[in-house]
């Protein structure tokens, strides 16, 4: 579960600002993302909103690439084939 310090924010507006160290930053609506506590947020909280992040998580199975919740009806196809008989 995410805590407040893990929250990511995305810009609601495009604007330019100067930070305390004198550097100028262009913030772009829908593009610029910052973490909770970042200097760009201080005094500009109304210009950002929380970003809802969803990560894909692979299932812990023998099938590489299979995602949790995928239908298990068809097993993943293997790219290698083994033969049980050997010629001498």
Image (cartoon, rainbow, N blue to C red):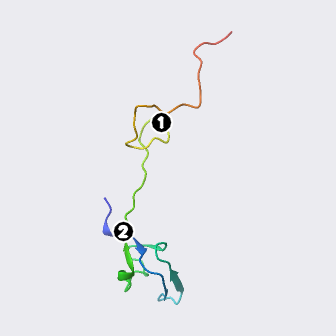
51 over 69 or under it: above or below: below
Q: Which residue is mark 2?
A: 7
Few, some or many residues within 10 Å of mark 2 (<14, 14–19, 20+): some
Q: Among all residues in the image, which is located at the extreme top? A: 88
**Real-space Cα separation, disc 2 to disc 1, in angstroms:** 32 Å
Percent coordinates x, y for residue 75 in the rendering: 46, 31
23 over 5 or under it: above or below: below
Residue at coordinates 31% horizontally, 65% vertically from top-left? Answer: 3
Image-based side of 54 in relation to 64, left or right: left
Mark 1 and mark 2 in contact (Cβ < 8 Å)?
A: no
Percent coordinates x, y for residue 84 in the rendering: 57, 15
Residue at coordinates 52% horizontally, 83% vertically from top-left? Answer: 25
Q: How many numbered dots are placed on residues in this image?
A: 2
85 over 34 or under it: above or below: above
Residue 51 is labelled as none
Image-based side of 73 in relation to 3, left or right: right
Residue at coordinates 42% horizontally, 55% vertically from top-left? Answer: 55
The quarter in which the N terminus is drawn is bottom left
**Badge 2 or badge 1: first in the primary sequence:** 2
- Is residue 52 or residue 7 the one in the foreground? 52
Percent coordinates x, y for residue 38 in the rendering: 42, 77
Q: Secondary structure at mark 2?
A: loop
Q: Secondary structure at mark 1?
A: loop
Q: Which residue is mark 1?
A: 63
Image-based side of 75 in relation to 88, left or right: left
Residue at coordinates 54% horizontally, 87% vertically from top-left? Answer: 23
The quarter in which the C terminus is drawn is top right
Q: Quadrant of residue 52?
A: bottom left
């Amino acid at each position: 579960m995410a805590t407040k310090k893990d929250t990511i924010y995305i810009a609601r507006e495009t604007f330019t600002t100067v930070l305390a160290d004198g550097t100028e930053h262009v913030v772009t609506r829908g593009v610029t993302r910052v973490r909770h506590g970042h200097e760009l947020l201080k005094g500009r909280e109304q210009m950002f909103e929380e970003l809802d992040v969803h990560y894909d998580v692979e299932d812990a199975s023998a099938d590489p690439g299979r995602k949790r919740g995928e239908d298990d009806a068809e097993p993943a196809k293997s790219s290698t084939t083994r033969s049980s008989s050997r010629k001498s």
